[in-house]
Image: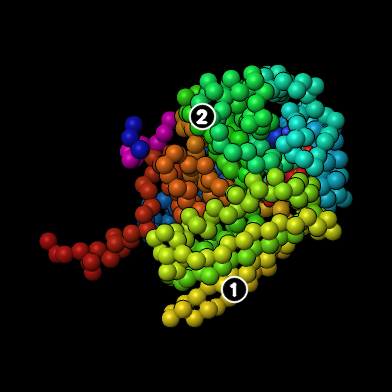
Amino acid sequence: MSTTDNVALPVAPADGKLGVVCVGLGAVATTFIAGVELIRRGMAEPIGSLTQMGTVRLGKRTDDRSPAVTELVPLAGLDDIVFGAWDPYPDDAYVSALNAGVLDAARHLEPIGDTLRAIRPMPAAFDPSYVKKLDGPNVKPSRSKRELLEGIRDDLRAFREEHDADRLVMIWCASTEIFVDLGPVHADIDAFNAAIDADDTDITPSMLYAYAALLEGVPFANGAPNLTVDVPALRDFASANGVPICGKDFKTGQTLIKTVLAPMFKARMLGMAGWYSTNILGNRDGEVLDDPESFRTKETSKLGVLDTILQPDTYPTLYGDMHHVVRINYYPPRGDNKEGWDNIDFFGWLGYPMQMKVDLLCRDSILAAPLALDLALFLDLAQRAGMSGIQEWLSFYFKAPQVAPGLYAEHDLFIQQTKLKNTLRWIAGEDQITHLGVEYYADDYLPDD
Ligand SMILES: NC(=O)c1ccc[n+]([C@@H]2O[C@H](COP(=O)([O-])OP(=O)(O)OC[C@H]3O[C@@H](n4cnc5c(N)ncnc54)[C@H](O)[C@@H]3O)[C@@H](O)[C@H]2O)c1
């Protein structure tokens, strides 16, 4: 079948249970898990989730056809999800959610306390040299990378059996690891395996989780900026083994705003002298990012966005001399409630300078949780549809989208949304929507025969 045929992909039905295993049982993971439980008990609405609330327009604007995403493509139902997790801290999901302080305990944790307490983290493949600020006791005993890899694979098989799960999806919701350069050990799967056996420091714990997932045929999404599955060895292995992957770094706060505003300046051909972004946050993620080596991983992910959208090489007069700065400061009083400020120095006609200030007071995990849900459901869909390797259509959810070699990433949120919805139309065998729209003006625009 060609990619341009209007034929629905043969998608296996979403029967049975979907196991969603989260690496990390911190603020994002517990907010995600608690939210799904509250929604399935009818105690909350899935606000922020495209899979649960979104629609996709089909056909012409006059056709009045806009099915829900769940009607257009077969997704697993929320009632069919079972959760698991790993974390170096032994707290169950209830205690961890309480510590994270995101959700109101009386309103949103107590009523589902039984479900949350039953989710206890499996011992983590954890090495404090990759996340300098943490050191928990719930870890796998071995230091050997090969044994850690095999331990994660065993966990996946045991989880699948214990919960009678038909399919699994793994999501990295764990801390940001220190910056690791792409190196020769990541070039292909043979070099990667040799490096595992040599306990090479360039093989990070997140790469072991991702590789374990791929070996077990489990789709993998990376919510943090670590390279993880974004290395040639694992990318090629995912394609060869028919497993979908996507990443990196959930696009939730400041970068979400940036990828909406920057395309606006560019679309109007307005120039940019500088964009200064700073954040304060006080959760454990903020504490980890206080370490310069973890911050470097995040900074790389956040900085790439503007250059790709504004294309300074193509528009040197407008963007050739732009100063882009990103700062994150750990400030405990704010907890999970991040504040992000942006100061944008832009210029217009005849070079006259102007400014825009954005002050975003958001809740980090409240924005991230629905993304984790959508990614789990869409990755499972991709696998049932036979789509393997990089799922670029899910770049909508990421700050540093993983793309095929030789491609630049699309960062513009609305291009990403179009790509996502067109992919859903393509899976369902429906026409793409190009927004050309001449068909509504045929009498005016087209020559008479
Ligand atoms: N919340 C957002 O808006 C957002 C946006 C983009 C990216 N992220 C990323 O998502 C991740 C999770 O964020 P969070 O706020 O939940 O952080 P968190 O610190 O609350 O939770 C992370 C958890 O991961 C655990 N962990 C660390 N290394 C591990 C390992 N090797 N194996 C298993 N568990 C491990 C930690 O113990 C911790 O409990 C972070 O990397 C963060 O940068 C979050």
Residue 345: mark: none
Magenta part of the protein: which range? 4-12
**Residue drawn at (57%, 24%) of the image:** 192
Taking the spot 72% from the left edge, 41% from the top edge, the residue there is 175
Residue that lies at the very extreme toward the left in this rendered image: 449
Q: Is residue 308 magenta?
A: no
Looking at the rendered structure, the kind of residue marked 1 is: Met
Callout 1: SS:
strand
State yes or no: residue 11 in magenta: yes
On the image, the x and y values in percent for residue 209 come to: 66, 29
Of residue 54 and residue 121, the one placed in the foreground of this image is 121
Q: Is residue 251 above or below residue 83?
A: below
Q: Is residue 80 left or right of residue 318?
A: right
Q: Quadrant of residue 61?
A: bottom left
Above or below: residue 164 compared with residue 87:
above
Q: How far across and how far down the image is residue 26, in percent?
A: 77, 42
Residue 98 image position (x, y, % from top left): 85, 45
Residue 372 spot, x, y in % from top left: 64, 43
The residue identified by callout 1 is 356
Disc 2 residue type (three-letter): Ala
Number of the label disc, if any, that sits on residue 187: 2
Query: Mark 1 vs ligand 1: CB under 8 Å?
Result: no
Q: Is residue 17 visible?
A: no
Q: Is the Cβ of the residue at disc 1 closer than 8 Å to that at disc 2?
A: no
